[in-house]
Amino acid sequence: MTSGTGIDALDAKLIELLEAEPRIGVLECARRLGVARGTVQARLDKLIARGVVRDFGPRVDPAALGYPVTAFVTLELRQAVGHQPMAQRLARIPEVLEAHTVTGAGDMLCRIVARTNAELQDVIDRVLASEGVLRATTVIALAEQIPHRTLPLVKEAAGLN
Amino acid sequence: MTSGTGIDALDAKLIELLEAEPRIGVLECARRLGVARGTVQARLDKLIARGVVRDFGPRVDPAALGYPVTAFVTLELRQAVGHQPMAQRLARIPEVLEAHTVTGAGDMLCRIVARTNAELQDVIDRVLASEGVLRATTVIALAEQIPHRTLPLVKEAAGLN
DNA sequence: GGTGAAAGGTCATTAAG
DNA sequence: CTTAATGACCTTTCACC
């Protein structure tokens, strides 16, 4: 039985299956997992309801879109400026894919992409032009050693390791 | 139509539609976009073939899984140790969701999650135990100001801005 | 479990670059 | 001439009741 927040092995295997072959339907999942289709449907509904599975939206690859340069930019902000308004300004820049407030010397960490290194400079300039940005420290991602993944974590959470 | 590598407005609108409502099918997309079903199917196939759309896998939320703590850890490595073997060791730690080799003082930047701050320390200790890690600098993400997104970039690439 | 409705494929025709 | 879009038809498969 699944406690309030945990997931069990079946949930994990279901997610793993959907991760490997997203196009298959509920019925096919049921067949491969050896359980009734109703069970799969109920599990999926619960996973979605609990927010474990956000959605099944298309995962876009920025590199294939023509933006092969990825950088992580740490921003130092003027104390007076709030994080929320800053985030709103950053949100207007399409190349900013992600932004977090963080501990440490910097105040915000952003993931930024660009078509070329030259354009990366241009994007950073746009960020710096934002009210309240004191300083930006940039590191460029040379290679993606581990692409974004959650499957091992799912298995861990289900106690499968 | 635009050149070989670009995407056009219809592609962008298709991605936007699927992003907003991932559960609708090809036929429904065709209806809403006012084009034939075959067109939508052809566009989608091409987007997938070109790698712009990776897949439609389930997006798992680590926080809902019980891992609400996110951290970005910069690793300094011994020069002798290669990045590839290092990545393989990191890949064995489920809490490491992502890893990039980067420019700058650090050598690798990892995204790590944990159940609690205390467990984060534990995960970092596991990373540090890896052969070749000299030093780890950690910043904890306090809030996700801009959740991972690609839609604005898609529109930009299609020339819709 | 049964049924209505999609997905996915192929085709000929038409339009546009 | 090449590439793309369209609407039609078909079969298999799934989602929902």
Image (cartoon, coloured by chain):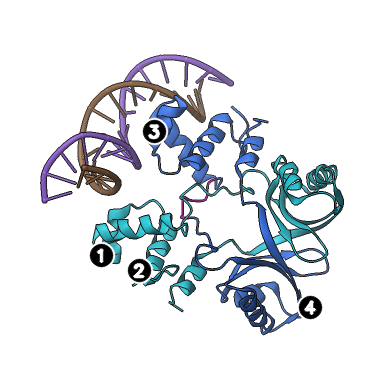
Chain colours: A cyan, B blue, C purple, D brown
Does label 2 or label 1 sit earlier along the sequence?
A: 2
**Mark 2 — on which chain does it sit?**
A
Residue located beneath label 2 in the image: A10
**Within-10-Å neighbours for mark 2: few <14, some 14–19, many 20+:** some
Contact (Cβ within 8 Å) of mark 2 with mark 1: yes
Magenta stretch, main secondary structure, is loop
- How far is mark 2 from mark 3, CA to CA? 32 Å
| Image quadrant assignment for residue A13 | bottom left
Chain of the residue on which disc 3 is drawn: B
Q: Which residue is mark 1?
A: A35
Q: Which residues are magenta?
A: B53-58
Tag 4 and tag 1 share a subunit: no
Amino acid carrying mark 3 in the image: Glu
Q: Residue at x 41, y 43 (%)?
A: B23
Q: Amino acid at mark 2?
A: Leu
Gap in Å between the C-alphas at discs 3 and 1?
A: 30 Å
Residues marked 4 and 3 touching at CB (< 8 Å) = no
Q: Which mark is residue B28?
A: 3
Labelled disc at residue B79? 4
Locate residue A36 relative to residue B29 in the image: left or right.
left
For residue B152, side relative to residue D9 (left or right): right
